[in-house]
Image (cartoon, helix red, strand yellow):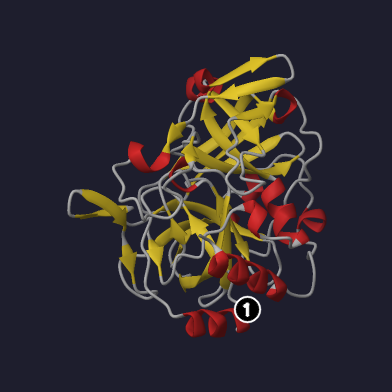
Amino acid sequence: MKTTTMSAAALAAALSLAVPAVAQVDGQVIYGSDGRIDLYQTENAKLRALADSTVALMEASAVKAEGDIAKLATEPYGPGNGLCKDEPFYDQVTAAFCSGSLVAPDIIMTAGHCVTSDSSCADTKFVFGFSVKEKDKMPLTAPTKEVYGCKKLLGREQVDNGADWALIQLDHPVAGHAPLKLNLTGVIESKTPILVIGHPAGLPTKIAGGAEVRDASQEGYFVTNLDTYGGNSGSAVFNARSGLIEGILVRGENDYVYRGACRVSNVCAADACRGEDVTKISSVADKLPGIQHRDRVAELGPTFASLMQSIGAASESRP
């Protein structure tokens, strides 16, 4: 992930233009200022609703159900990655290897390189609610009812310079989480403000904004300046105005660079470096079984401008 420096005044100005700050995925970077925040840092109901329907992909062996509670095999983020102690979220834990989103009552959408075969699907657990809901309280367990298995790999595609997606049918319908809505118009334009929610570097849920589409002309994907890391792969990328899913985060820049003997996040200007690639939702939407166009294109509201204020205020106050 890459990060570019931005003053508090510049960040406030960006937020006033309704461009939320977002988090990213596999092999990514920070562009501009690091706007990632934890779930507890926003009270915005729309953001929380989007986050509520995102999911962490974990190795099945790392999730041990004991009655109503599943223990998660977590690792320390900072020490485990050789990071400098001032790196954001240094003291948090990691557990996810990819991210995903609920797009039908029993279907998860993620990146194709996250689930490559029927056997890898069978070896994956899909965990809702892997997030920091209270400051400094790490999610070391999850309710067993929030853990789902793979029933079937419905389809996937993985093109190095193109679309990268997978659809998984879960072992039973999801309770308590609403399927997210998709932009099925097939239209995405450069400069569209976007945000991402997922598990950068395997961390608990992060929300990040202040990003936009840099190039929408590519076949099967568009290029952005989202802030993402490995672990964000498969994250849903949302239109910051409508709240609809525009794509799936799949590729990007290197996450870290060395600063002496330890590592820090790679930082790029908002319009620099290679950018982060997002599979267009139009590349996968027609593969979704039983999804009616009229049901999936409904708007969540007139604008998501209030999300930016929520994200910006929280990221400014983040320790």
Residue visible at 49% across and 53% down in the picture: 249
Residue 188 visible in the snapshot: no
Asked if residue 144 is positioned above or below residue 156 in the image, the reply reads above
How far across and down, in percent of the image, does residue 94 sit?
47, 37
Q: Which residue is mark 1?
A: 18
Q: From what the image shows, is residue 271 above or below residue 149?
A: below
Which residue is at the front of the view, 273 or 206? Answer: 206
Left or right of 83? Residue 120 is right
Quadrant of res 271:
bottom left
Please say if 224 is above or below 67.
Answer: below
Regarding residue 247, the answer to whether it shows in the image is yes
Numbered disc total: 1
Name the residue located 61 percent from the left edge and 49 percent from the top edge. 135
> In the depicted view, which residue is nearer to us: 109 or 96?
96
Give the amino acid type for the residue marked by disc 1 in the picture. Ala
Q: In this picture, is 30 found above or below 263?
A: below
- Left or right? Give the position of 67 relative to 154: right
